[in-house]
Image (cartoon, helix red, strand yellow):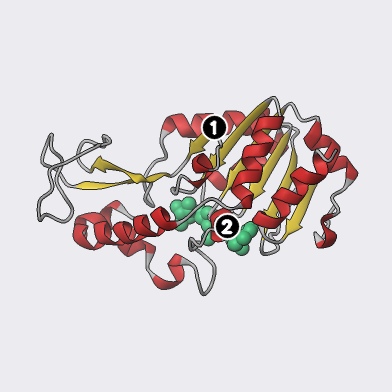
């Protein structure tokens, strides 16, 4: 069942499923932060990977080869994130969380915009760019002495500091992975929002939810080819579709 969102008329069955859902799980990707002015990764022209080579900037090997380049690139991304504010899509998800008995927000984003919008139960699959950790000890470091060194050094072991994000080829934080898998398996309604579904293991979560009986809703600017049945595909901006869905589901 596919419904173009002109006029935002959502199928009655979907509105009912949302209003009476026991447990909702949501997977978000860079697309939900696009309307906050943050570049996605794979959009042909504007995506970060259209301009920069991930293997030169987002792998542990790249960091070992050129830690200054990688640190400064993440500093630049951090400044973008600092300037960004949550958009209506983020706020609508926080609203849904307040209206359903159980809710989990699984994000691939490292920008904290969901938390800023008031979302509580957020699972950060790929870390958070506002946190820093020691490359050697893999432990979060809150503060370090200001020196000329770029990147700065760990105050405990002297190792290099790095952003607390998951780079290609690295394992996801186990706790987050378990929480994401459990939330997906137990959901009766699963949303996949603003993700191209090209990066595992996140890309498998909608299928896991669907295999365990969930109704799946995808919201994406571009048409995504999902092989699921019992799915609702909405093509458009998450910041427009989500508020309209909340408004329709809980109207009056
Ligand atoms: N509303 C909804 N969807 C949107 C919007 C929008 N306003 N703008 C863009 N999109 C869609 C794009 O069409 C694309 O399908 O969001 C998707 C973003 O996909 P990617 O750029 O591939 O980002 P994501 O899926 O989050 O990437 C996964 O890859 O590079 C790594 O670690 C990084 O977490 C990231 C992971």
Q: Quadrant of ligand 1?
A: bottom right
Residue 202 horizontal/vertical position (percent):
54, 45
Residue 42 horizontal/vertical position (percent):
52, 65
Q: Does residue 160 appear left or right of residue 89 in this picture?
A: left
Question: Does any atom of ligand 1 lie closer than 8 Å to the CB of label 2?
Answer: yes
Please say whether residue 151 is visible from this viewpoint.
yes
Q: Residue furthest right?
A: 12
Residue 52 horizontal/vertical position (percent):
38, 69
Q: Which mark is residue 120?
A: 1
Label 2, secondary structure: give it: helix
Label 1, secondary structure: give it: loop
**Residue positioned 59% across, 47% down in the render:** 90
In the rendered image, which residue does mark 2 sit on?
Answer: 31
**Residue positioned 75% across, 33% down in the render:** 213
**Residue positioned 39% across, 44% down in the render:** 128
Quadrant of the image occupied by residue 32: bottom right
């Amino acid at each position: 069942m596919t419904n173009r969102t002109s006029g935002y008329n959502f199928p009655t069955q979907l509105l009912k499923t949302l209003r009476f859902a026991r447990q909702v799980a949501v997977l978000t990707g860079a697309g939900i932060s696009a309307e906050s002015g943050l570049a996605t990764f794979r959009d042909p022209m504007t995506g970060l990977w259209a301009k920069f080579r991930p293997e030169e900037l987002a792998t542990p090997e790249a960091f070992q080869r050129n830690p200054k380049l990688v640190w400064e690139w993440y500093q630049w991304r951090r400044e973008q994130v600092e300037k960004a504010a949550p958009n209506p899509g983020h706020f609508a998800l926080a609203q849904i969380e307040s209206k359903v008995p159980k809710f989990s927000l699984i994000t691939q984003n490292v920008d904290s915009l969901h938390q800023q919008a008031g979302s509580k139960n957020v699972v950060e699959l790929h870390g958070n760019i506002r946190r820093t950790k020691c490359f050697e000890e893999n432990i979060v470091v809150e503060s370090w002495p200001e020196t000329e060194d770029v990147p700065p050094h760990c105050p405990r072991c002297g190792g290099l500091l790095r952003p607390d994000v998951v780079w290609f080829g690295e394992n996801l934080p186990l706790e987050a992975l378990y929480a994401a898998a459990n939330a997906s398996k137990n959901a009766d309604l699963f949303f996949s929002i603003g993700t191209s579904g090209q990066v595992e293991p996140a890309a498998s979560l909608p299928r896991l939810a669907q295999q365990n009986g969930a109704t799946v809703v995808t919201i994406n600017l571009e048409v995504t080819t999902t092989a699921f049945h019992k799915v609702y595909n909405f093509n458009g901006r998450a910041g427009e579709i989500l508020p309209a869905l909340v408004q329709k589901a809980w109207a009056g």
